[in-house]
Image: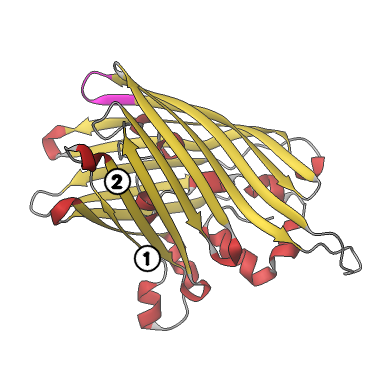
Amino acid sequence: MIQRHDRHSLTLLRRGAAALLMSLSSLVAQTSFDWLNYPVFSADLAMAGATVALSGSPEALTVNPAGLGANGAGRQFWAGARTYPAGISQLATAFVWKRGSQVWGGSVRSMVFGRFDGYDEDGLAGDAYSASETALQLGVRQRFGKLLSLGVSAGIAAGNLADRSAVALLWSAGLQVQLPAVAAQIGLAVQNNGRYLWQYGNEGPADGLPTRWMVGLSKGLAYLPLTLHLAAGRLFFTDEWLWRVGGEFRLGAGLALRWGVDQDKAGYRRGSAEQDLLSGISLGLGTLPGDGRWMRTQLDAGVKLLGPLGITTAIALSYRL
């Protein structure tokens, strides 16, 4: 089954989309819906998903629900899209609104893998089939004083692969702590924990979803117009350690230049120093929130360079109500 993040594109291109999608073995339960832990909105993509301690991110429902926010407004809406190699795409919307010391949020995300030619066990052509997965999530953040925020989100994810399907309940939870003395904040989150109601193939007991623990730091630098984001964690199913680094440079005219890199960079090596330097790097450009009627709308774009695979691109539009 496909790995649900940037490596999933690498595996898909190496082994062939049709063969992987029809391999409904125990790997399905290990990897399905894991794409929810990786950014679809362009600002988070450009910063390599290192936003565990960031407030006001449209990815907060899965990255860290304690970061739910509306960037100074009472309500905010986002719409975004991300394209991958091999014709795969992801669409998402997110909405947050404030109620006193609480912020509520909801999102709908869909991963579309496309249509594929089917083959039987003898390698003969059969009927074409499609593959897609969709998740609906709701969450809330509660502030305690001026320094501490706690958040939790829950949702349901459903997938279709030819004539088979999978459904799972999932949740994420986290906290953020403000450190005003050093102009920073830290975050801690558990991402995409949950259980299948039923899984592809219905073979054996339903398994749990892949679970991540992540800790992060966001800090505005004193002598540069830069906010630095650091994150590290662990994927418990495979005992894989994760790390992510990202940053946002504030430019003139309300613009931001973003960049990032994560542990997947090592998987794009080609043996060429020049090409390897760029492979795995994320970049993006977008507008910053501000006062005034026209500053309510923000537009962002981002790319991640996948070495020999090409690039993955994302674009997002947000509006503060």
In depth, the one of 56 and 288 nearer the eye is: 288
Position of 9 compared to 58: left or right? right
Residue 206 position in % (x across, y down): 73, 35
In depth, the one of 299 and 21 nearer the eye is: 299
Q: Which residue is mark 1?
A: 281
Amino acid type indicated by mark 2: Gln
x 40%, y 37%: residue: 60
For the question of whether residue 39 can be seen, the reply is: no
Residue 25 position in % (x across, y down): 77, 52
In magenta, the rendered stretch is: 144-149
Disc number lying in front (1 or 2): 2
Q: Is residue 132 above or below residue 149?
A: below
Q: Secondary structure at mark 2?
A: strand
Amino acid type indicated by mark 1: Ile
Q: Which residue is mark 2?
A: 298
x 54%, y 42%: residue: 109
Q: Residues within 10 Å of mark 2 (few under 14, many from 20)?
A: some
- Count of numbered circles on the image: 2
Q: Is residue 50 above or below residue 285?
A: above
3D distance between C-alphas at marks 1 and 2: 23 Å
x 7%, y 53%: residue: 223
Position of 16 compared to 291: left or right? right
x 66%, y 57%: residue: 114
